[in-house]
Amino acid sequence: MTLASGKDSQSLHSHDVAVIGCGVVGLVAALVLASSGFKVMVVGSRPAQFVPNENQRFDPRVFALSHRSQRVLDRLRVWDNIPSEKVQPVTEMQVWGDSEGEEQGLLRFNASDTGVEFLTWIIEQSCLFDVLFSAMRYQPGIDWLDAKVEGLSREKEGWAVVTNLKTVRVPLIIAADGAQSETRKQAGLDFPLEDYSAEGVVATFAVEKPHHGAARQWFSGDSVLAMLPLPGPHVSMVWSMPLSQSQAFVQLGPEQMVQRIKALSGGAVESMYGDLVPVGKAYSFPLRHGVAPVWFDNGVVLMGDAAHVIHPLAGQGLNLGLEDAAELANLLTSRKRLLAVQRLGLADEQLWRAWERRRKAACTPVHFLTDGLHTLFRLDLPGAAWVRNKGMHIVNQLPMLKRWLTQQAMR
């Protein structure tokens, strides 16, 4: 990788593509393209690095990586560079409904029931950034311009990406700059995101009892509480709650925060984990959802959260973004396709139309299923809770259906 200088002149189309955004999805897309022989310019500043300390050992933001995401990182020779002590495999998932006692719904998914060793892997956001930036540094064909994008301009043979340091001219742009993508807006591909009027609150806790590699989740009306296992005696909490509650929650003292968590689960958290001790602060982020009607047009591609934003209750947001890059890798694997693209250029419309069709077909059902589940558990109608929890009981007693659901979640 070469760090581009603001003083160097950028000749016309010295790169096949500009990837705007230095998040996980943008870096993976850049590595996929560079490993296929294309010249890539990554534009954007590296996110602020998390530096662990005595009070905050873990990055509050964590991801649950699916099997397909793991294979993408493995194919790029990134997976083995992640320190094993920073990865927590998940062997079981447990999900509780919003009733109490015998009426409460329960779903259990075990890795052994599906014939795999692990269902998913929990990894810190900062850890992924570190290994991906390291891979980008040693990957031929990638240049990085650490600059702020100030505007886009459509030209006869492509796009001019105007930054505070220089102007980059490329035939194709991949917008991977997040849910509030400025690139998407400037390219005329913006779409409305629906606000849930809720936030996700994340925090890390030391636990008294072992978590046994189990991920656990509780639905409670308009809230969803997840406790994800971390290496050692630690868990990561991800609590989706109404905006009216989240801001007050992050200001609570440690004891009050723990009591709120225990109360939502009806004492189950205390029974399973024993004492909880906060490790560092709690943070919140807004919850929205939406899917772009158009993912490719006029030489601009939307990828990751720039194309699709979903509720975190299923832990699939990052996985869908990594699958965007994986599908591109699959299309480029075909020698016939790769030769055609190399001849016509990476902005070949047929390539991206095929990619868009495949990704929409895979992503849209996940989006609507996740949004539907969130809506279902917020319904406050007579009998709604009974139907929800009874449905969970029925699914839990159907091994073939559970296996299928697990396979879809793992992908």
Image (cartoon, rainbow, N blue to C red):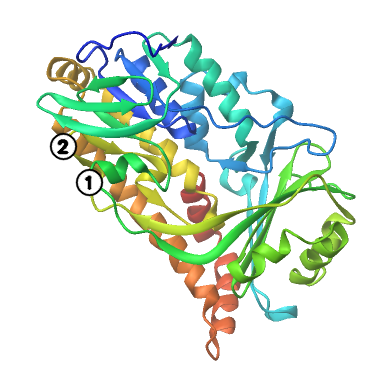
Residue sitting nearer the eye, 269 or 25: 25
Q: Which residue is tagged 1?
A: 188
Task: Answer left or right for 39 relative to 305.
Answer: left
Find residue 36 and report its image quarter: top left
What percent of the width, then of the height, locates residue 288?
46, 59
Question: Can you see residue 218?
Answer: no
Q: Are marks 2 and 1 in contact (CB under 8 Å)?
A: yes
Q: Residue at the spot x=48%, y=33% of the render?
A: 23
Question: Can you see residue 410?
Answer: yes
Find residue 304 and report its image quarter: top left
Q: Which residue is tagged 2?
A: 298
Q: Residues within 10 Å of mark 2 (few under 14, many from 20)?
A: some
Identified by mark 1, the residue type is Gly
What percent of the width, then of the height, locates residue 380?
55, 84
Tag 2 secondary structure: loop
Marks 2/1: CA–CA distance: 10 Å
What percent of the width, then of the height, locates residue 181?
38, 43
Residue sitting nearer the eye, 5 or 21: 5
Tag 1 secondary structure: loop
Q: Residue at the spot x=53%, y=51% of the render?
A: 406
Residue sitting nearer the eye, 119 or 47: 47
Identified by mark 2, the residue type is Asn
Of marks 2 and 1, which one's residue comes earlier in the chain?
A: 1
